Amino acid sequence: MQHRFTFRRTTQADVNWASDAAPDDEQFEFRMEAMASDAQWIEGVTESRRVGQFEIMISSHEELEVVKKKLVPLLRHYWDYLRIVL
């Protein structure tokens, strides 16, 4: 199954005591590429690649809800730079 996840940049409205400032375009691009790359190492994922500017396609034999749960640690890691659109 292929699962498409859409992300957005962290904005100034998202910034709080834990985040200094919203990332610039270069930081966002770097983090999106890293997120797609890191997702390949999640158990059960057969492929992860970036499609478009704000989307990552993840192929897995797992159902969508299982993949979402497995993505949580990565989402926490990249929280200062990008947010998933649910």
Image (cartoon, helix red, strand yellow):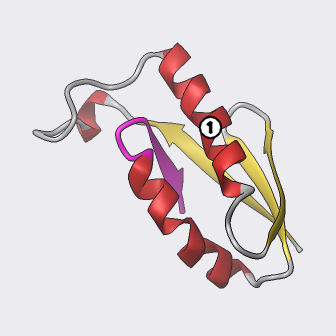
Kindly indicate the quadrant of the structure image that contains residue 18.
Answer: top left
Q: Position of residue 5 (x, y in %)?
A: 68, 56
Residue ID at (52%, 27%): 28
Q: Which residue is mark 1?
A: 34
For the N terminus, the image quarter is bottom right
- Seen in the image, is 43 located left or right of residue 51? left
Q: Position of residue 76 (x, y in %)?
A: 39, 56
Residue ID at (71%, 31%): 53
- Seen in the image, is 71 located left or right of residue 10? right
For the C terminus, the image quarter is bottom right
Amino acid type of the residue tagged 1 in the rendering: Ala
Residue ID at (47%, 56%): 75
Q: Is residue 83 magenta?
A: yes
- Seen in the image, is 63 located left or right of residue 15? right
- Which secondary structure, mark 1? helix
Kindly indicate the quadrant of the structure image that contains residue 54.
Answer: top right
Q: Position of residue 52 (x, y in %)?
A: 78, 34
Q: Position of residue 46 (x, y in %)?
A: 86, 65
Q: How many numbered circles are shown?
A: 1
Q: Residues within 10 Å of mark 1 (few under 14, many from 20)?
A: some
Kindly indicate the quadrant of the structure image that contains residue 36.
Answer: top right
- Seen in the image, is 6 located left or right of residue 49? left
- In magenta, the rendered stretch is 78-86
Q: Is residue 29 magenta?
A: no
